[in-house]
Image (cartoon, grey):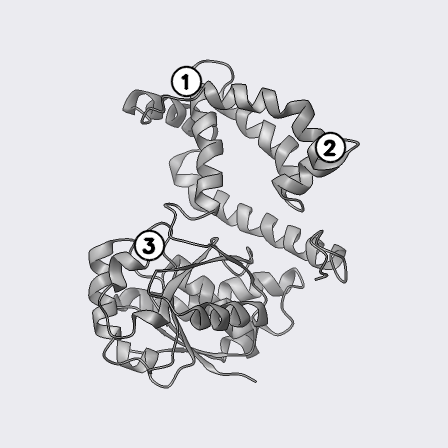
């Protein structure tokens, strides 16, 4: 059964969420305080839906677009909706001001998920009347191509709210995970951060250039990571499974971890060196073109995965 969904903040992430919910059959009321962003939303959504249709990821782009309504006020966006997804600027003060307003106008039983990439919900919802209904629902951008959503409750979030949002995300085709506490960076960015820390260090120490580090992931680790996670990877990489792998290579990884006991910030000199290499490969003016290329490659991968994984077990005992 379809319902109305409110989307607050209609930039890159918010417009992506708009597609997710509309694609699943929901009417979306999208709002952004910036009039230019509001004015361009439907065109941006339409362009992305056309690309998705080219790859067979949606059947009827126009019918999906017809479920998108751009509204001119915050009140219209949250009026009589069943769920609200917030995707405003990643600043605590901006989010706090917004939630103080939402708290007085959103329905008493309506969950509100924040697309926050790292700010915990408690930082901008503590003390609010409906804090039990608020949590982080952090996507990977763009969410209509990356199904993962991290659900991170604050200490005040009602467990029933997490259950409801988990069910909604599954219903709209996303893959929600539950983060059991407000750990900094949540799960995805902590995993990404561990790789970035090592990538920057290996570059700084001269062991490889940026292009070869990228190739290591692109043509090595990333191929299997597109359909397996780290625990399944190591479980399959030793004859006796994960315990055998841990016994064989645990010492190596411990030694590597101990080698990075004094993390340092990325210096401006280091950033400039990586930037120089990247700009030698890709001119700054060409970034939007390359981003479009990335999204189209993701669409092709999503289409392949949808075909390959139909009815296939995900390795956890369930099928997708």
Task: Between residue 44 and residue 123, name the one nearer to us.
Answer: 123
Q: Nearer the viewer, mark 2 or mark 1?
A: 2
The residue sitting at 44% across, 36% down in the picture is: 193
Res 70 → quadrant: bottom left
Measuring from the top left, give residue 199's x and y in whole percent.
47, 26
Q: Write down the residue under mark 1.
A: 204
Instruction: Give whichever of discs 1 and 3 has the lower sequence position.
Output: 3
Measuring from the top left, give residue 133's x and y in whole percent.
36, 72
Bin the neighbour count of mark 3 within 10 Å (Cα to Cα): few under 14, some 14-19, many 20 and up.
Answer: many
Bin the neighbour count of mark 2 within 10 Å (Cα to Cα): few under 14, some 14-19, many 20 and up.
Answer: few
The residue sitting at 24% across, 55% down in the picture is: 92
The quadrant of the picture occupied by the N terminus is bottom right
Res 57 → quadrant: bottom right
Q: Is residue 176 left or right of residue 80?
A: right
Name the disc covering residue 237, or none: 2
Measuring from the top left, give residue 105's x and y in whole percent.
26, 81
When the figure is inspected, residue 51 is found, relative to residue 7, above or below; the finding is: above
- Dot 3: what SS? loop
Task: Between residue 293 and residue 9, name the one nearer to us.
Answer: 9
The residue sitting at 43% across, 41% down in the picture is: 287
Name the disc covering residue 120, or none: 3
The residue sitting at 40% across, 82% down in the picture is: 81
Measuring from the top left, give residue 101's x and y in whole percent.
21, 73
Residue at the outermost top position: 206
């Amino acid at each position: 059964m379809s319902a109305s969904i409110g989307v607050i903040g209609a930039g890159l992430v918010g417009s992506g969420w708009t597609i997710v919910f509309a694609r699943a059959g929901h009417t979306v009321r999208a709002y952004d305080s910036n009039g230019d962003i509001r004015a361009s939303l439907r065109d941006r959504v339409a362009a992305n839906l056309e690309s998705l249709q080219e790859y067979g990821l949606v059947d009827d782009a126009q019918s999906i677009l017809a479920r998108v309504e751009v509204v001119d006020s915050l009140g219209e966006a949250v009026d009589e909706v069943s769920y609200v997804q917030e995707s405003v600027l990643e600043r605590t003060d901006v989010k706090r001001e917004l939630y103080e307003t939402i708290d007085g106008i959103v329905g008493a039983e309506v969950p509100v998920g924040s697309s926050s990439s790292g700010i915990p919900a408690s930082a901008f919802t503590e003390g609010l009347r409906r804090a039990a209904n608020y949590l982080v629902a952090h996507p990977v951008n763009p969410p209509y191509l990356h199904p993962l959503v991290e659900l991170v409750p604050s200490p005040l979030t009602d467990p029933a709210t997490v259950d409801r949002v988990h069910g909604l995300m599954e219903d709209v085709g996303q893959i929600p995970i539950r983060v059991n506490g407000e750990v900094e960076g949540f799960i995805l960015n902590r995993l990404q951060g561990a790789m970035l820390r090592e990538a920057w260090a290996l570059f700084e120490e001269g062991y490889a250039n940026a292009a070869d580090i990228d190739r290591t992931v692109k043509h090595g680790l990333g191929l299997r990571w597109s359909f397996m996670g780290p625990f399944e990877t190591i479980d399959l990489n030793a004859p006796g499974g994960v315990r055998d792998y841990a016994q064989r290579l645990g010492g190596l990884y411990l030694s590597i971890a101990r080698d990075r006991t004094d993390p340092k910030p990325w210096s401006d000199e280091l950033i400039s060196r990586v930037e120089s290499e990247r700009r030698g490969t890709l001119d700054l003016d060409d970034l939007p073109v390359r981003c479009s290329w990335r999204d189209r490659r993701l669409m092709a991968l999503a289409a392949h995965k949808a075909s390959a994984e139909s009815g296939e077990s995900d390795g956890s005992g369930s099928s997708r």
